[in-house]
Amino acid sequence: MSAITVLLVDDHSMVRKGFRRMLEDDPDIRVVGEAADGREAVKLAEELKPRVIVMDMAMPGLNGMQASIEILKVLPQTAILILSMYSEENYVRNALEAGAKGYILKDAMDIDLAASVKQVAAGEKVLAAGLLSSAPEHDAEMGKLTNREKQILQLIAEGKSNKEIAALLDLSVNTVSVHRANLMEALGIHRTAELVLYAVRKGLVRIP
């Protein structure tokens, strides 16, 4: 059986080193690359086509959820395992709706990363104990938005301009404006400040 290939994505090199060590202790796993942010993750995923991507949730530029959406468009078979500091249900739900196969907490003392990687590679879902009180219920309001609109909503809430969003997602500024208008229409929200509050309430962004 060939080794499970893994791409590690985290903006802290020390964290990547630690995770790499954990994974490379297992003969069935081979770390094929490391990325320091979401954009680099998308690029490397397309080049390396790993079976599993271990992805940090909070990163500058594209975060883990946004990078997952981009990667799964091109590589739907890749299993994404999200590592996060956040245990709130909204975050877990957003990650799973973006297509992640697993969500585990970074600071859990009993984290067995290699076992989690093997589980998602085998097509199983992995959720840290006690994260979701039940199967994630569908959020009807958020369900009105496409994944692209969710990405743009999140980036608006993070204070990015249409031009910055266009650069991050490889879109034209005009396309971003159209998505922005569509999502405001879908949510019945017409001011940026209200969009930011909405995104915070839905767990798309955290107020630092």
Image (spheres, rainbow, N blue to C red):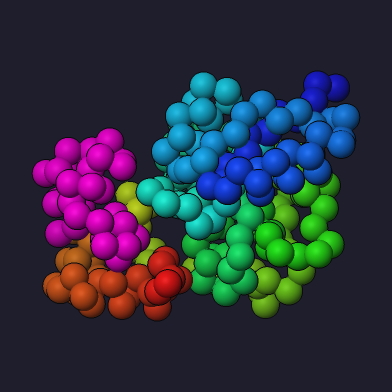
- Indicate the quadrant containing the C terminus: top left, top right, bottom left or bottom right: bottom left
73 to 18, vertically: above or below: above
**Magenta region, main secondary structure:** helix
**Location of residue 111 (image quadrant):** bottom right
Q: Is residue 141 visible?
A: no
Give the residue at x 40% y 48%.
62
Point 31% across, 42% down: residue: 168
In the picture, the quarter occupied by the N terminus is top right
Q: Is residue 67 left or right of residue 185?
A: right
Q: Is residue 173 magenta?
A: yes
Q: Which residues are magenta?
A: 152-181
21 vs 181: above or below: above
Q: How many marks?
A: 0
Look at 15% across and 73% down and name the residue there. Answer: 191
Magenta stretch holds residue 104: no
Q: Nearer the viewer, residue 164 or 103?
A: 164
